[in-house]
């Protein structure tokens, strides 16, 4: 667990001595031992106060002469690893005392953040040295971002001097989206990396055994503003740590965050923080036990290490309701430990393009990332096991792990990536291409021809300027019939998102892509097109199927992934995408059928020849969160254990089947297993 005060925003007035007055390191450690925590991350320094006897940062006035960090170290010694939590960003005393630390925008105005190229690095080193002297076991360093949106920085004298020395030219005057801005992006990324490397090097020099991890924001929904790339900034510490929660990452984002972090360095430790509060970190509420179980077990099923964040009430005491729920939660985790951490079965590789995030998404990251999250949503709803592929560490070996690779609107693909994809398909791989994939150059410029033209077997005619595009399919028999399964024959349906008109060369076309109707007022520019219109005339094929070498490519000229995560999501759009996957991979080794409010995670223990199917029941089908105004709608917390039936088909000789939960009924017929479950989390263990 991570335990700390609600944050100094509730008690930053130095005369407010009631704030954190009862924050006790001794009590916190004893409570962790009581509920079965395996390590403690203790809040030691935020943007306003130190919660120990610091000579560098102001001490929280409510503590008086007490030192919670010392209390915790003395109580935990030999019993529990103790990690110190330390905030970097967040305004507070550093900017008041040291205006030279301020980040500036392109106009030279302060923007309320700390510049990582300023002298603050030395201040941070002094803070870490103080805490290390207590004998702690390591650090969790948080808030290393350069901002989560406009105004952007930094154009301070330190940054301008360093940039000019590095590039031999002045910084661009704001966000310019050209060669100078590319240099600026690289400069921002290197600034973040250098700051983290220096802090870790400093800690290692003082205490070689101390661990260091940094709270990482290189994954969706975050974008370039933060100053972190998915792979480059993930493992600058000893392991990568992200965070999740329905409040800002969506119910679906729990599993996606875990799989994304795992992809940054396959085989390495990845950690995700969840919180006990209903809304977010600082609200001091506590979710129902089943809601906590759902998130905890989802993360563990996906193979991640978990930290639960506990924010104490105003005075720093511990909430008995929270710890009354942590005890059975942690006991369940210990009881199920052998069933977590095994190799995931991943039939579909979701390709994530940081280049598309930066140069196609630009200042509207959802323009790119909505398709990625929508593809993930479709796979989860249809119980298709997935993993993540990242453009920064893409390799032939990584691609070959997946029977199917999906490019969800990956607008920018560099030559080396295209070569790897071609090699993958020619060698027998299967590829799904959607939307504008391969249609933009390295800086987001439009191309005259797709870089995937050979793979998709078609040439570019034009991009549609609209998003309210439709598709229509005839009744189909024969080889291509699976592509239109459960789609209404002869009727057009909306697939809201980018679309492209293609002319087949070697590919087989299927169905029609239809442009949207535009009223007279819309044609005159007197009326907007924000709301979808009805279908108009066909402009090209909806789907193209191409063979290349031993493999196949299905190109969807529309964006069913974008639509699936959008506000006009319809079942048919999602089915179009999953039909393409199932067409390419019709007989997976293990297949799960269950309600859409049940997520399935499949793992393999090859040494013991055991498959595990984790079934995770949610209140309703978990939804993705839109790119803006997150979270748009907070779902109700899970209170009741769900009752449902799941079917598992294993295409291998089955030796034995058992369910972990005593209340689950199992029936087996050949390679088909039927399970009737009433719980938030169940594990079906299949020996083969």
Image (spheres, rainbow, N blue to C red):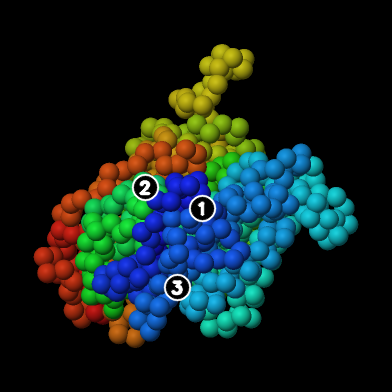
- Estimate the x, y position of residue 181 in percent, counting from the top left: 76, 48
Query: Closer to the observer: label 2 or label 3?
Result: 3
Q: Is residue 597 left or right of residue 404?
A: left
Q: Quadrant of the C terminus?
A: bottom left
Kindly state the secondary structure of the residue where label 2 is placed. Answer: loop
What is the C-alpha distance between the residues marked 3 and 1?
Answer: 37 Å
The structure residue drawn at horizontal position 41% and vertical position 34%, both measured from the top left corner, is: 568
> As drawn, which residue projects farthest toward the right?
168
Q: Earlier in the sequence, mark 1 or mark 2?
A: 1
Report which quarter residue 600 is drawn in. Answer: bottom left
Quick check: 477 above or below 650?
above
Q: Earlier in the sequence, mark 2 or mark 3?
A: 3
What is the C-alpha distance between the residues marked 2 and 3?
Answer: 27 Å
Residue ID for mark 3 = 70
| Pointer 3 with pointer 1, Cβ within 8 A | no
Residue 220, label in figure: 1
The structure residue drawn at horizontal position 40% and vertical position 81%, both measured from the top left corner, is: 77
Residue ID for mark 2 = 283
- Estimate the x, y position of residue 143 in percent, counting from the top left: 55, 57
Kindly state the secondary structure of the residue where label 1 is placed. Answer: loop
Report which quarter residue 234 is drawn in. Answer: bottom right
Regarding residue 270, the answer to whether it shows in the image is: no
């Amino acid at each position: 667990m991570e335990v700390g005060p609600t944050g100094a925003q509730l008690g930053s007035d130095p005369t407010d001595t009631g704030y954190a007055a009862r924050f006790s390191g001794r009590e916190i450690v004893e409570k962790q031992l009581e509920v079965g925590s395996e390590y403690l991350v203790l809040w030691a320094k935020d943007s306003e106060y130190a919660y120990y006897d610091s000579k560098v940062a102001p001490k929280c006035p409510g503590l008086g002469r007490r030192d919670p960090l010392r209390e915790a170290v003395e109580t935990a010694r030999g019993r529990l690893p103790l990690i110190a939590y330390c905030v970097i960003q967040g305004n507070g005393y550093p900017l008041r005392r040291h205006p030279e630390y301020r980040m500036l925008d392109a106009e030279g105005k302060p923007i309320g953040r700390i510049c990582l190229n300023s002298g603050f690095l030395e201040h941070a080193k002094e803070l870490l040295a103080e805490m290390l002297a207590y004998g702690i076991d390591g650090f969790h360093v948080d808030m290393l971002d350069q901002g989560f949106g406009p105004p952007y920085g930094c154009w301070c004298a330190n940054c301008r001097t360093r940039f000019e020395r590095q590039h031999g030219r002045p910084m661009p005057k704001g966000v310019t989206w050209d060669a100078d801005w590319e240099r600026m992006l690289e400069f921002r990324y290197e600034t973040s990396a250098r700051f983290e490397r220096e802090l870790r090097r400093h800690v290692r020099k003082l205490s070689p055994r101390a661990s260091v991890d940094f709270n990482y924001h290189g994954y969706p929904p975050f974008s370039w503003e933060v100053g972190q790339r998915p792979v480059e900034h993930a493992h600058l510490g000893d392991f990568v740590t992200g965070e999740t929660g329905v409040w800002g990452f969506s119910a679906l984002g729990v599993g996606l965050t875990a799989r994304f972090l795992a992809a940054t360095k396959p085989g390495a430790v990845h950690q995700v923080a969840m919180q006990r509060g209903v809304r977010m970190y600082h609200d001091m509420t506590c979710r129902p036990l089943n809601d906590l179980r759902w998130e905890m077990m989802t993360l563990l099923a996906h193979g991640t290490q978990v930290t639960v964040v506990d924010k104490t009430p105003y005075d720093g005491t511990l909430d008995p309701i929270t710890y009354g729920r942590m005890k059975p939660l942690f006991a369940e985790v210990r009881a199920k430990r052998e069933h977590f951490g095994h190799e995931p079965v991943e039939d579909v590789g979701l390709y994530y393009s940081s280049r598309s995030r930066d140069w196609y998404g630009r200042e509207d990251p959802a323009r790119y990332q909505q398709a990625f999250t929508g593809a993930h949503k479709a796979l989860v709803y249809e119980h298709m096991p997935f993993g993540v592929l990242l453009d920064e560490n893409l390799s032939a070996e990584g691609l070959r792990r997946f029977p199917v690779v999906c490019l969800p609107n990956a607008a920018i693909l560099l030559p080396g990536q295209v070569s790897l994809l071609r090699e993958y398909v020619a060698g027998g791989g299967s590829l799904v291409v959607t939307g504008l994939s391969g249609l933009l150059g390295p800086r987001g410029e439009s191309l005259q021809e797709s870089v995937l033209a050979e793979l998709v077997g078609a040439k570019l005619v034009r991009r549609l300027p609209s998003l309210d595009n439709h598709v229509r399919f005839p009744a189909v028999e024969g080889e291509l019939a699976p592509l239109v399964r459960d789609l209404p024959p002869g009727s057009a349906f909306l697939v809201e998102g980018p679309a492209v008109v293609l002319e087949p060369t070697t590919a087989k076309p299927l169905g029609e892509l239809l442009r949207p109707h535009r009223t007279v007022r819309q044609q005159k520019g007197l009326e907007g097109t924000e709301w979808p219109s009805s279908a108009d005339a066909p402009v090209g094929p909806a789907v193209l199927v191409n063979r290349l070498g031993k493999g196949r490519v299905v190109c969807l000229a529309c964006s069913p992934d974008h639509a699936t995560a959008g506000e006009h999501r319809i079942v048919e759009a999602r089915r179009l995408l999953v039909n393409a996957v199932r067409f390419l991979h019709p007989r997976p080794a293990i297949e799960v059928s269950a309600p859409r409010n049940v997520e399935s995670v499949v793992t393999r223990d090859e040494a013991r020849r055991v498959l595990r199917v984790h079934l995770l029941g949610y209140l309703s089908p978990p939804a993705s969160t839109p790119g803006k105004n997150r979270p748009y709608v907070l779902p109700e917390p899970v209170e009741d254990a769900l009752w449902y039936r799941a079917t598992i088909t294993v295409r291998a000789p089955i030796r034995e089947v058992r369910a972990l939960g005593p209340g689950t009924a199992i029936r087996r017929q050949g390679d088909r297993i039927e399970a009737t479950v009433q719980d938030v989390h169940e594990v079906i263990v299949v020996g083969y």
